[in-house]
Image (spheres, rainbow, N blue to C red):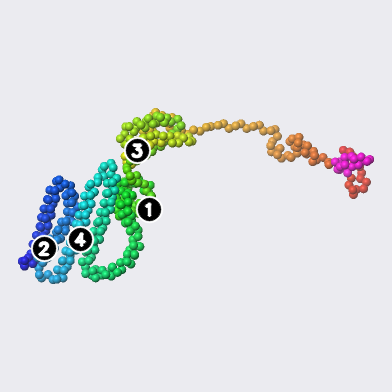
Amino acid sequence: MSALRTWPGLTVACLLAVVVAVVLTAILALILRGIGRRRRWPDLLIRRVRVPFRLFLLTIVLWIAVTISLPPEVTDGWRDGIRHTFLILTIATGTWFAAAFVVFFEDLGLARYRLDVPDNRYARRVRTQVLILRRLTVVAAVVIGLGAVLLTFPALQAAGASLLASAGVIGIIAGVAAQSSLANLFAGIQLAFSDAIRIDDVVVVEQQWGTIEEITLTYVVVHVWDDRRLVLPSTYFTTKPFENWTRQHSELLGSVEFDLDWRVSTGGMRAELNRILATTDLWDHRTGVLQVTDAIGGWVRVRVLVTAKDAPTLFDLRCLVRERLIDWMQRHSPASLPRQRIELAEAPEPRERPPRARSEEEGRLFSGSPENEQRAQQFTDAIPVIREVDGEPVAVRADDVPLKDTPNPAPKEDR
């Protein structure tokens, strides 16, 4: 044993430790590959835990080799530093190996639920929940490993009591400072287990059509139809309304509408629709009808209702029906095409005006008609006055009456 406690012995011991780690890893890999000929899980296990297991095993065997063969002339301070370093490396690689092992079990559960089947709603729900749990598991493993590493330092152990004493105040401050982050965190957990959205769900958010590509603890990625990615916070799906087209099932019903002329042949269009649906595999044979839904104004509104197995297929089917019906109307029923009708009318001829201009008639008050002439005569003739002549009343004109102040007026000549 004393021969090993030399610098050459330390080198040999480290090399032997590396060889032992490689040999153990190779033996375990051969065993798992032998089992993997009949089962699928060994290949998944090797792919997940191969790297962290090798590092964890190598750290342990090197720690043992260094502890056994470390020369006696190494001071206690260096011994404590080397031991502390290997302890931190062991905690870190062990945490990585444990997290990878848990992820392996999660993948093993996901392998039972396939997404490439027609009715995969339950599979997408389980996949969404497992992916959220995976992220929680990784975060928890990192926090625990980091806490274990920090506790290996004596200074942090002594300060633990004071940290716990002020945990209440720090928790309040951290909660206020990270309010939005915590809200997104809890919203992400709520989305995973409330079944509001799942991976590959077809949704309409912010007037954009797309599918749920990724759900994390803080945000959701929506793959938009034109290959853009819409990243939304998790709180968006818990506080705002959105459309989920695959909430219960993926089958959908869509409409195609036309504004056509009143001379349209709905019977001919219906027969053509049935022929189109019978020759395409986009239709799922559930609904295929043609109806006149409105007939107001200058057009007749014709609506076609069709169904398909999912949203992309329904979009293609609606486009196909629209194109084929337009082509049929152009070739076989041109009278169905919409037209704008305008009625032209001639202006009426003007009536003859009276011989006297209207402006002249309106400018004269006492002429233009017998009544006006009589009225003028009444206003221009002298007003008669009744007087007694030789004891009998006689009507005379007002201008023939002499004034009282004029003595002995001279009689006027008769006009």
Q: Give the range drawn in magenta.
A: 384-401
Crowding at label 2, few (<14), some or many (≥20) Cα neighbours within 10 Å? Answer: many
**Total residue callouts:** 4
Q: Mark 4 points at which residue?
A: 92
Q: Mark 3 points at which residue?
A: 307
Q: Position of residue 200 (x, y in %)?
A: 30, 46
Q: Are marks 3 and 2 in contact (CB under 8 Å)?
A: no
Q: Which amino acid does label 3 sit on?
A: Thr
Q: Which amino acid does label 2 sit on?
A: Ala
Q: What residue type is labelled 1?
A: Thr
User: Considering only order in the chain, which callout, 2 or 4, is on the residue closer to the N terminus?
Assistant: 2
Q: Mark 1 points at which residue?
A: 239
User: Considering only order in the chain, which callout, 3 or 1, is on the residue closer to the N terminus?
Assistant: 1
**Residue 312 seen in the current view:** no
Q: How much space separates mark 2 and mark 1, taking CA atoms?
A: 58 Å
365 sits to left or right of 62: right
Q: How much space separates mark 3 and mark 2, taking CA atoms?
A: 70 Å
Of the two numbered discs 2 and 1 in the rendering, the one whose residue sits closer to the viewer:
1
Q: Give the residue displayed 53% in from the left and 32% down from the top.
A: 344
**Residue 276 seen in the current view:** yes
Which type of secondary structure does the marked residue at label 2 adopt? helix
Q: Residue 65 has which mark?
A: 2
Q: What residue type is labelled 4?
A: Ala
Q: Residue 53 has which mark?
A: none
User: Considering only order in the chain, which callout, 3 or 4, is on the residue closer to the N terminus?
Assistant: 4
> In the current view of this chain or complex, which residue is farthest to the top?
332
